[in-house]
Amino acid sequence: MSPESRKLLIVEDDAGLQSQLRWCFENFDVVVAGDRNSAITELRRHEPAVVTLDLGLPPDPTNASEGLATLEEILRLAPHTKVIVVTGNEDRENAVKAVALGAYDFYQKPVDAEILSLIVERAYRLFELESENRRLWGKLERSPLTGIIGSSPELLKVCRTVEKVAPTDVTVLILGESGTGKELLARAIYSLGGRAEGNFVAINCAAIPETLLESELFGYEKGAFTGAGKQTKGKIEYADGGTLFLDEVGDLPLSLQGKLLRFLQERVIERVGGRQEIPVDVRVVCATHQDLTGLIREGLFREDLYYRISEITVEVPPLRRRQGDAVVLAMEFLQRFSKTNGCAASGFSKDGLAALESYAWPGNVRELENRVKRAVIMAEGAQITAEDLELGVPESERIPFNLREVREEAERRALSRALSIVEGNLTRAAEILGVTRPTLYALLDKYQMRE
């Protein structure tokens, strides 16, 4: 990338130091400002990726208040910009305060050109990676699988399966733990299929009492039971021409399983209290977090019904098995909730990111969403910490003694993360990893990661 495209804004009121800093950054297109107003003007004009900001700005260079106010305004206008505050030798307190407000890092005078250049270069590389991630998240949001966010190979495999089965009319069973997004996948199957003009009717088999579930599904005739004052259609009839989603089908009572099986075989229903067979043309998608084969062994779920609803089975991996997706989702939720709640949080601290990656997420995406939402509202700084997420700072992982295992695990993780970030672009992946394309191909073959 040419220096002209790598914008760096230097906010410094000392003319001599301005010249010195220009010399430090030959590989950047440097823009200089001497006070708060000119800094904001240059920020709007050039949209720099990185800003170095002297906290001692006029009208009172001995006080950090103008510099801190400038920092807050920069982050309000351009929250993704990496700001490196430059402070006096005895001003560590304000430097720490600036980082709490959202500065990327701080540097204390006197200026060492080599060290400051290294900090700026690192900040710029992080800005590039985050920009690429935002581009990928935007692409995922625009994908046919509306609402499905993530870039892990495990999730992308599920998405490809959904795209294949959606245009068909087969009955699909979605398996996965609570909070993994089974209903989102069911809606994706509906929207990508040939019945998108019809209704999408969802019913949670675990949320409705057994005494009411039959009439909810199949409807009832007037006078069928006390309170049945008029003929009422059931969920299955309302889904005619569209898609019926039976969530938590593993909780369906045995007394209703036989009636559901008959409907799936014959595609006709009878309302409660009625004798007329009503034909219904509907696609059925089921989901459950339960082990249906285990329920079959216990006599709690009909084996013939299981084979009828699982013409195609889609298994949704839990969040802990989706490498890198916790951070991708957390960033998406952070942007969404910061905007809707008018909060200033713009990113995660290092310990916050480490906590997101190491936590097991027993409640999966639903738990992650709730934790980020609460953290955005409660966080006092611009960066969300592990404490804000109510997660412990992760301890060091247990590392095996066998050096070959350590190296292979590190290589496998680095490959997976790089491929997720660049969405399979092998040239970019090789650049990020610092290897040649032939070396990258050899590593992908070694770990059987080629698609």
Image (cartoon, grey):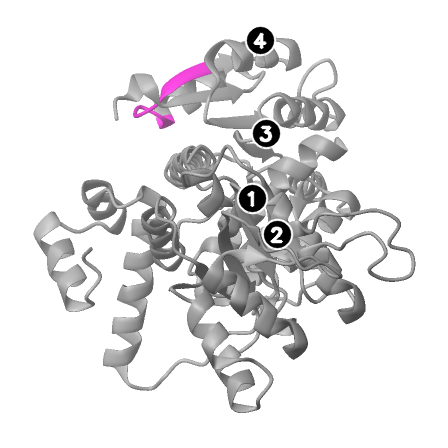
CA distance separating discs 2 and 1 = 7 Å
Q: Residues within 10 Å of mark 4 (few under 14, many from 20)?
A: few
Residue type, label 2 = Ile
**Is-magenta flag for residue 25?**
yes
Q: Residue 293, image x and y in percent?
A: 48, 82
Residue type, label 3 = Pro
Q: Nearer the viewer, residue 280 or 119?
A: 280
CA distance separating discs 2 and 4 = 61 Å
Residue that numbered label 3 is attached to: 79
Instruction: Give, as a single range, the part of the protein colored magenta.
Output: 24-31
Is the residue 347 above or below the residue 227 in the image? above
Quarter holding the C terminus is bottom left
What kind of element bears circle 1?
Answer: loop
CA distance separating discs 3 and 2 = 49 Å
Q: Nearer the viewer, residue 62 or 254?
A: 254
Q: Nearer the viewer, residue 399 or 96?
A: 399
Which mark sits nearer the N-terminus, 3 or 2?
3
Residue that numbered label 4 is attached to: 41
